[in-house]
Image (cartoon, coloured by chain):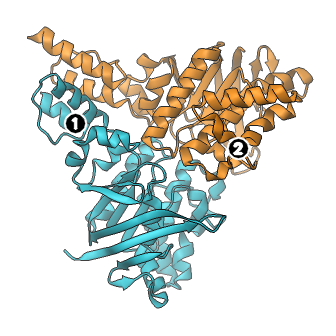
């Protein structure tokens, strides 16, 4: 699915003293199969933007097109387009309500009117996709750990077979082990399905592990949009937008300031390690 | 130094539906000195939050005892005094925001303590300035972003002027600017003599403290300085934790025969050691 955002603006409670412009004249395009990170300080408009892309809000100006169809329109085609987008809010496990993991994940597919065999197949596929054992299907979601519940919530979205998956801070509240696993499963899912991934995150280190392109919002405006290695390593840009650079970049920048001949646009610890070793070898 | 929180043989179990009980804490012995700043780390479900809730009497021991400033939490007459001494900032700010504007929310605690109105005003002003929400004071809390609401929750607790603050992953939902603001605020409060207990998943945050407690399956399995805790990298990973990136890179360099000081925890320390 091709996502086009054209001159999009949004104002909360317009026409009152509390009116606040959350998005100002945003234009961007996300091609099918892209892995995109969306970053920005709290209140920068990230959640508002993803809700527009999912067709949950009506633009004050401009529009969002999903394969050419206005995202918020009340037409059958727009509804069909919205169904191809999966959106996980922060703490998606808060929305879990069924008695078993199976029923929870089957809820969406069942509402699509799929037959029993197809529903069962999708549940099985989704459970495996997030790395949970199939035997967990019969358990109550309320007896699982935090990381497991988060993955059940994610599986219930994946079972809808979205062409676009939008995740708002998917690892918030998970321990580092849970984060590593969730990110690995998301990468695996994206690789196998070729779907579009749009991930909101505060953590540049986490974005560096999974996305290839990063969009930065600041005060409702587009502050940057480019390759992850360019945007996330741009210290001036990131700090002006109230964000950190990955820790590897911080280290490489500090070394460079002290005269080391290292590149600073390497986002992952392994890459930084190799670069430091290479620079030392070449200096010797 | 004197003990502010003292815990002996603490056990806690939660009842399950079938009448069974699940053990969340399995024998905790711990002393936290007055004015200390301690970080508690551990995987989800390791018992961090349960332990923290014993430190202000939100939970009472299944077995063992907890003293706060010499007061036993299981003594009903002292429970109120315990809770006045220890303030708690939870993961999710929406659980502790009660009023319809920012300043009224911060004033809620002091008003209930029946303080004079100029004192209430002073405390509200201080607390809002500390967390950087002064310009939002007349806005309704639901109009703030998630990060701003967490700052508001902290302001509400600060206004009660407790002797000890327990932060349960206060920064997990915050962006860097607000996270530094919160961490700076915590450091300043600690400098002013407040005892701080910081529960966190972010190992980078734990580098700020002198003492880290690592929890696993209801027990404290390490109680040491950050540098020494981080030397147990493989163990930490097995327990669902991580190393700070700088420690990770330093390990990689050491494995290739580089000589580096043993106590590197932050990017800045590693950069200095390499230059």
Q: Is residue A259 left or right of residue A91?
A: left
Give the labeled residue for mark 2.
Answer: A138
Q: Quadrant of residue A61?
A: top right
Rendering coords of residue B128 (x, y %)? 47, 62
For the C terminus of chain A, give its image quadrant: top left
Q: What distance separates the C-alpha of mark 2 from that of mark 1?
A: 49 Å
Q: Do we see residue B226 in this rendering?
A: yes
Rendering coords of residue B98 (x, y %)? 63, 67
Determine the colour of chain B.
cyan
Give the labeled residue for mark 1.
Answer: B268
Q: Is residue A139 left or right of residue B92?
A: right
**Identity of the residue furthest to the top in this view:** A282
How many marks the image carries: the answer is 2
Rendering coords of residue A2 (x, y %)? 71, 14
- Closer to us: A127 or A28: A127
For the N terminus of chain A, give its image quadrant: top right
- Closer to us: B174 or A32: A32
Give the mark toward the camera: 2 or 1: 2
What residue lies at 53% left-to-right and 39% top-to-bottom? A171
The chain carrying label 2 is: A
Do the dots labelled 2 and 1 sit on one chain? Answer: no
What residue lies at 28% left-to-right and 70% top-to-bottom? B31
**Identity of the residue furthest to the bottom in this view:** B77
The chain carrying label 1 is: B
In the rendered image, the vertical position of residue A255 relative to residue B269, given as above or below: above
Q: Is residue B172 left or right of residue A114?
A: left
Determine the colour of chain A.
orange
């Amino acid at each position: 699915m091709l996502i086009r955002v054209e001159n999009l603006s949004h104002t909360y409670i317009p026409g009152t003293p509390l009116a606040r412009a959350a998005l100002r004249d945003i234009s961007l395009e996300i091609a099918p199969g892209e892995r995109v990170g969306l970053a920005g300080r709290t209140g920068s408009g990230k959640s508002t933007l993803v809700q527009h892309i999912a067709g949950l809000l009506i633009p004050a100006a401009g529009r969002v097109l999903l394969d050419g169809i206005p995202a918020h329109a009340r037409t059958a085609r727009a509804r069909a387009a919205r169904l191809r987008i999966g959106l996980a809010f922060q703490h998606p496990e808060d929305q879990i309500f069924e008695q078993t993991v199976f029923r929870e994940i089957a809820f969406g597919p069942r509402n699509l009117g799929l037959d029993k065999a197809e529903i069962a197949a999708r549940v099985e596929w989704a459970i495996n996709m997030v790395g949970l054992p199939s035997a967990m299907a019969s358990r109550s979601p309320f007896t699982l750990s935090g990381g497991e519940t988060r993955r059940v919530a994610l599986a219930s979205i994946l079972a809808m077979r979205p062409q676009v998956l939008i995740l708002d801070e998917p690892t918030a509240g998970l321990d580092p082990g849970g984060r590593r696993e969730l990110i690995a499963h998301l990468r695996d899912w994206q690789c196998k399905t070729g779907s579009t991934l749009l991930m909101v995150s505060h953590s540049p280190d986490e974005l560096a592990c999974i996305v290839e392109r990063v969009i930065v919002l600041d005060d409702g405006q587009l502050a940057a949009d480019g390759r992850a290695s360019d945007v996330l390593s741009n210290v001036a840009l990131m700090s002006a937008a109230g964000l950190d650079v990955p820790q590897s970049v911080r280290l490489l920048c500090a070394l460079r300031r002290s005269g080391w001949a290292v590149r600073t646009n390497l986002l992952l610890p392994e890459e930084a390690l190799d670069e430091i070793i290479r620079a030392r070898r070449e200096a010797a | 130094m004197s003990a502010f929180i003292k815990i002996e043989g603490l056990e806690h179990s939660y009842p399950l539906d079938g009448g069974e009980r699940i053990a969340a804490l399995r024998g905790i012995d711990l002393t936290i000195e007055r004015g200390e700043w301690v970080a508690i780390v551990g995987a989800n479900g390791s018992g961090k939050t349960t332990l923290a809730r014993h430190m202000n009497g939100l939970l009472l021991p299944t077995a063992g005892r907890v003293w706060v400033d010499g007061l036993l939490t299981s003594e009903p007459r002292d429970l109120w005094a315990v809770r006045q001494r220890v303030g708690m900032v939870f993961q999710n700010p929406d659980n502790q925001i009660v009023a319809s504007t920012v300043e009224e929310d911060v004033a809620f605690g002091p008003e209930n303590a029946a303080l004079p109105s100029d004192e209430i005003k002073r405390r509200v002003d201080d607390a809002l300035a500390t967390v950087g929400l002064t310009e939002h004071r007349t806005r309704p809390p639901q109009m703030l972003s998630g990060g701003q609401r967490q700052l508001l929750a902290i302001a509400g607790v600060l206004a009660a002027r407790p002797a000890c603050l327990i932060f349960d992953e206060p920064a997990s939902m915050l962006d860097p600017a607000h996270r530094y603001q919160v961490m700076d605020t915590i450091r300043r409060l600690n400098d002013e003599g407040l005892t701080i207990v910081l529960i966190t998943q972010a190992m980078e945050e734990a580098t700020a403290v002198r003492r880290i407690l690592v929890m696993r399956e209801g027990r404290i399995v390490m109680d040491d300085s950050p540098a020494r805790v981080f030397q147990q990298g493989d163990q930490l990973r097995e327990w669902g934790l991580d190393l700070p990136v700088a420690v990770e890179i330093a390990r990689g360099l050491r494995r290739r025969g580089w000589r580096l000081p043993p106590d590197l925890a932050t990017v800045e320390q590693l950069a200095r050691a390499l230059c």
